[in-house]
Image (spheres, grey):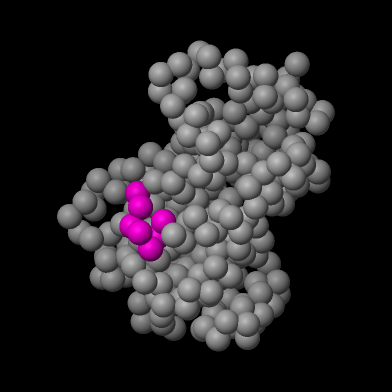
Amino acid sequence: MNLKNKLIIITGASSGIGLACAHECAKRGANLVLAARQYVKICEIASDIQNQYGVKVLAIQTDVSKEEDCIQLIKQSAYTFGKIDVLINNAGISMRALFADLDLEVIKKVMDVNFWGTVYCTKYAMPYLLETKGTVVGVSSIAGFKGLPGRTGYSASKFAVNGFLESLRIENLKTGLNVLLACPGFTASNIRNVALNNSAQSQGETSMLEDKMMTAEQVAIKILDGIEKHKRQLIMTSQGKLTVFLQKFLPAVLDNLVYNHFKQEKNPLIN
């Protein structure tokens, strides 16, 4: 797929991987619909990208946890551009708390954004994506292959996204729709700063060393290359590939490796 003049919708486009994807799409000549909750910020980003790259960009205020917002996002996108070629389900939130200590509202909020946001947007974009034989992308995580301590809700949401998209792929093997599951490793972004604590409030500070992680720009390049090449799955780091391998063949060994890794967090939840 050559992305020039394609219409790409990106959710969670105001920061991190979503923002990096927006710039990378525009570099490749795609027109964009940028969706995020912060309307003023997303409008400023849309204007900057349009001026910088000369592509058409529409900003739409969207809370993907609300079905009606997702319906309007897709309707406005299709009405404005007449088609939808790619949907990048990127909007997501994280959390950090031991299950024994958390308010269940934490898991509900994470599932509403990460899982239901992907389901809602994909559902209403499907007729347009089938018409263009386009691509639906789910930005998932290695946490969708291996449960991580202190991230019960986040891991559950990503396992759910993975299962949903794998099922969708098989349902559409003969329709021409491409389904891409993109799984970055730990990525330097603000997702950990705004991760929910045990009472569903933003934790405010990351617990990890961001300088040792992939950048959002590196992730965006891999996602866009994957779309162009009609890839079905991207495991983006050697650590991620090892995790998937060990989970399949040596899961008990991996349990201990993951436990020891998360013991080394700043202010660890396990010891």
Q: Quadrant of the N terminus?
A: bottom left
Residue 163: % across, % down: 38, 39
When the figure is inspected, residue 231 is found, relative to residue 129, above or below; the finding is above
Q: Confirm whether residue 37 shows in the render.
A: no
When the figure is inspected, residue 175 is found, relative to residue 212, above or below; the finding is below
User: Which residue is at the front of the view, 4 or 139?
Assistant: 4
Quarter assignment of residue 54: bottom right
Residue 134: % across, % down: 32, 65
Q: Confirm whether residue 48 shows in the render.
A: yes
What residue sits 67% from the left and 44% below the top?
A: 213
When the figure is inspected, residue 192 is found, relative to residue 243, above or below; the finding is below
Q: Identify the magenta region.
A: 226-232
What residue sits 51% from the left and 44% below the top?
A: 236
What residue sits 68% from the left and 67% below the top?
A: 38
Return the residue found at the far front: 238
Q: Quadrant of the C terminus?
A: top right
Residue 193: % across, % down: 75, 47
Horizontally, residue 22 falls left or right of residue 228, namely right
Horizontally, residue 144 falls left or right of residue 13, namely left
Horizontally, residue 265 falls left or right of residue 186, namely right
Return the residue found at the far left: 174
What residue sits 63% from the left and 47% below the top?
A: 214
Residue 26: % across, % down: 53, 75
User: Which residue is at the front of the view, 199 or 271?
Assistant: 271
Quarter assignment of residue 45: bottom right
Quarter assignment of residue 11: bottom right
Residue 260 counted in the magenta span = no
